[in-house]
Amino acid sequence: MDLEYVLDRLNMITHGWAHYFKHAIAKRVFSMLDSFTWWRLVRMLMHRFRWKWRDVRRTLTPPDRHWLPITAGKAQCRPIAAIPATRYRRRGLKIPTPFPFLEQA
């Protein structure tokens, strides 16, 4: 498949998953998944273009030596660790009960 299509679909799936689980305080899991997806994409590129590690490094790092995101056309591998994780508020006794006869006790 085309790399741009793969990146679009991957972003849709991972960001949907991350938005669903962002209330579970899963920041560490998000960063682990970012690392896993980056390595899988690099392995796919290495296999597709028959690159060695030095070719990956030459392609994905500019002269100032920081890693660039994997891109194809307008698509880019976006990290899910950048999604803010928030905890649900504890509501305790503020939740209304559907059973009014229990409130009298």
Image (cartoon, rainbow, N blue to C red):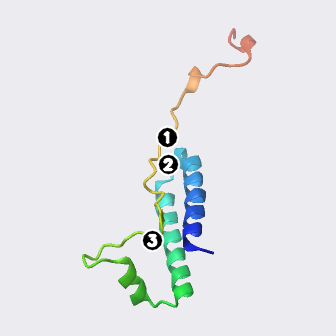
Q: Mark 1 points at which residue?
A: 87
Query: Distance between the Cα atoms at labels 1 and 2?
Result: 6 Å
Q: Is residue 82 left or right of residue 9?
A: left
Image quadrant of residue 52?
Answer: bottom left
Disc 2 secondary structure class: loop
Query: Distance between the Cα atoms at labels 2 and 3?
Result: 27 Å
Discs 2/3, front: 3
Name the residue type under label 3: Ile
Name the residue type under label 2: Ile
Discs 1/3, front: 3
Quadrant, the N terminus = bottom right
Residue projecting furthest to the top: 104
- Image x and y of residue 99, in percent: 74, 16
Query: Distance between the Cα atoms at labels 1 and 3?
Result: 31 Å
Q: Mark 3 points at which residue?
A: 70
Q: Name the residue under label 2.
A: 25
Badge 2 crowding class, 10 Å Cα cut-off, few under 14, some 14 to 19, many 20 or more, is: some
Above or below, 90 against 29 in this view is: above
Question: Residue 79: which disc?
Answer: none
Query: Are circles 1 and 3 on residues that touch, CB within 8 Å?
Result: no
Q: Earlier in the sequence, mark 2 or mark 3?
A: 2
